[in-house]
Image: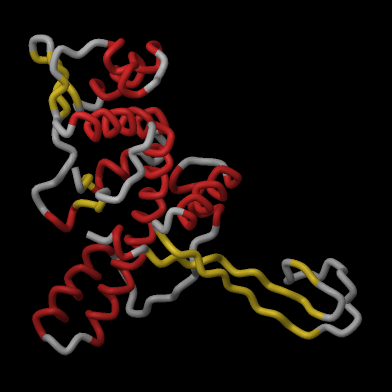
Amino acid sequence: MKHIRRSLVKETFHDTALLKAIAMAYLIKSKTKASILHKYSINLIHDMTGMHANTIKKRLRTLKEHGLIFVEKNSLVFRSTVSKHKDRNMNIGNMDFKNVKTVEKSLQALQVILIQQQKDFCKHAIHNAHHAHNPKKVKEAQKVCRRYGYGNKYCEKGLSYKTIAQKIGKSVSTIVKIIKNGVKKRYFKKITHFIWTQMKGVHFRDIEGYTFTTLNYGFQVKANTYRVGCKWRT
């Protein structure tokens, strides 16, 4: 269990129930080291995960609705969540499988990684389309840029908490927690950006165009940028 389909991670955007259900499935698979849970029962899953029986039933219904599990005789079978194409997967080999909550937090961090990797893909494609030395690479990159409507120049604007919240479907306060955990667990590195201007005597006043001021300076805080940790790259 080293990879997950990018498309499945994207499906969890705005779908907390699916994310939680996948977290339970991955916790079970991490404990059994298999995709089949023989002679399964709600009590057995409870003993394995520590989750409440009603919660387990709810998560199983969600997994079934998304075609991720089926029952064969008295066994619970988990369908594959990995693509045959390597570049369509995300690395989960270093996820925290301590309990269902840590798996949920790991999947939330993967959501942020997916958003950042989409930006990295765009940047890489535009660069290759105009600056690659290999003609074949240039042609392939130009094809990608046309397909996705990328422009001729990449402009890095960062990722604000608000933007991530809108993409994933969470509140900004929740995104702050997800980012904090992701940085702590080294899923990615957060780089903050700000511009400061000397403004003698501004003395903490609210000035239009500035995020905040101090005694003699005005600060404009820009959106953070992120760098995905090497162990989370496929």
- Name the side, left or right, on which 137 lies relative to 158: left
Residue 38 point in image, percent of width and height: 13, 17
The residue located at (70%, 80%) in the rendering is: 196
- Residue 74 placement: quadrant: top left
Locate the C terminus by quadrant: bottom left
Residue 98 point in image, percent of width and height: 37, 37
- Residue 56 placement: quadrant: top left
The residue located at (39%, 28%) in the rendering is: 17
Locate the N terminus by quadrant: top left
Q: How many marks?
A: 0
The residue located at (81%, 70%) in the rendering is: 207
Residue 230 point in image, percent of width and height: 31, 65
- Residue 106 placement: quadrant: top left
Residue 67 point in image, percent of width and height: 19, 26
In the depicted structure, whether residue 77 falls above or below residue 231: above
Task: Indicate the colouring scheme.
Answer: secondary structure
In terms of depth relative to the viewer, which is nearer, 164 or 78?
A: 78
- Name the side, left or right, on which 69 lies relative to 188: left
The residue located at (13%, 25%) in the rendering is: 36
In terms of depth relative to the viewer, which is nearer, 164 or 226?
A: 226
In the depicted structure, whether residue 2 falls above or below residue 160: above
In the depicted structure, whether residue 102 falls above or below residue 20: below
- Name the side, left or right, on which 189 lies relative to 153: right
In the depicted structure, whether residue 193 falls above or below residue 187: below
Toward the bottom, the furthest residue is 133
